Image: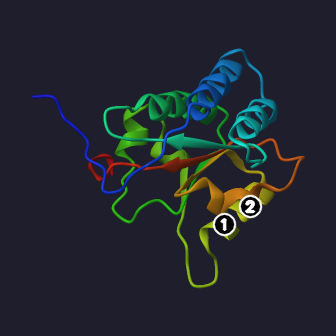
Amino acid sequence: MKNTFAISHSAQHTQATSPAVREHYARLAAGSRSFQHASRTAASQRGQSFGNLVSVNVYQNNMSELAYLLRMLKTMSQTHRWITLIAPPSSFCLSLFTQAGISPQQIRIARATATHNPEALMKKALQSDTSAAVIAFGDIENFADANEDEGNATPCFVINGLPSRLH
């Protein structure tokens, strides 16, 4: 029986996000470490500017953006730097990443506290420069200010609409 994934809330999908993720994947496959150009192009197509943040929208019957992201993360994890997850849902487990071939020892999870909100956690992760990629969960607008540093080359992704059955 084929599994279907229900979403508890509506996640918006734009035509610009999928090509941006694909372009990032193509650049990574070609050996490029410059993610900023593709992100700015996609953001300008949406009329928003979020530095090198890329929105990864997951919604019912379309997991292609998530699949691209997982392939990218597997390749990035080979640099032996952290894959940092910012504020994943409380029921989230690492099986999605380990099934994609990412070692759980390379995954670092930062959860929000009373003194550090998810945006502050993303800023800290980027400033430490120890991550191969930073992945946040929620709406991209919530993380727009966290990635202000133009010199930062760490790829940042914001997953929106992760179905509860994938946690």
Indicate the position of residue 146 as horizontal and vertical percent values: 74, 61
Reading the image, the residue beneath label 1 is 119
Q: How is the image coloured?
A: rainbow
What whole-number distance in Å separates the C-alpha atoms at marks 2 and 1? 6 Å
Residue at (46% x, 46% y) in the render: 104
Residue extending furthest toward the top: 30
Q: Quadrant of residue 114?
A: bottom right
Q: Is residue 151 above or below residue 91?
A: above
Residue occupying image coordinates x 33% and y 62% = 91
Q: On the image, numbered disc 2 is attached to which residue?
A: 146
Measuring from the top left, give residue 131's x and y in whole percent. Answer: 69, 48
Foreground of the two, 107 or 134: 134
SS category of the residue bearing label 1: helix
Structural crowding at the residue carrying mark 1, measured as other residues with C-alpha within 10 Å and reported as few (<14), some (14–19) or many (≥20): some
Is 25 left, or right, of 30 in this rendering? left
Task: Look at label 1 and name its amino acid.
Answer: Glu
Q: Amino acid at mark 2?
A: Ala
Query: Residue most toward the bottom?
Result: 114
In this rendered view, identify the residue nearer to me: 36 or 49: 49
Q: In the rendered structure, are the residues bearing label 2 and label 1 in contact, judged by CB atoms less than 8 Å apart?
A: yes
- Please, is residue 58 above or below residue 7 in the view? above
Q: Earlier in the sequence, mark 2 or mark 1?
A: 1
- For disc 2, the neighbor class at 10 Å (few under 14, some 14 to 19, many from 20) is many
* Residue farthest toward the left in the current orientation of the protein: 1
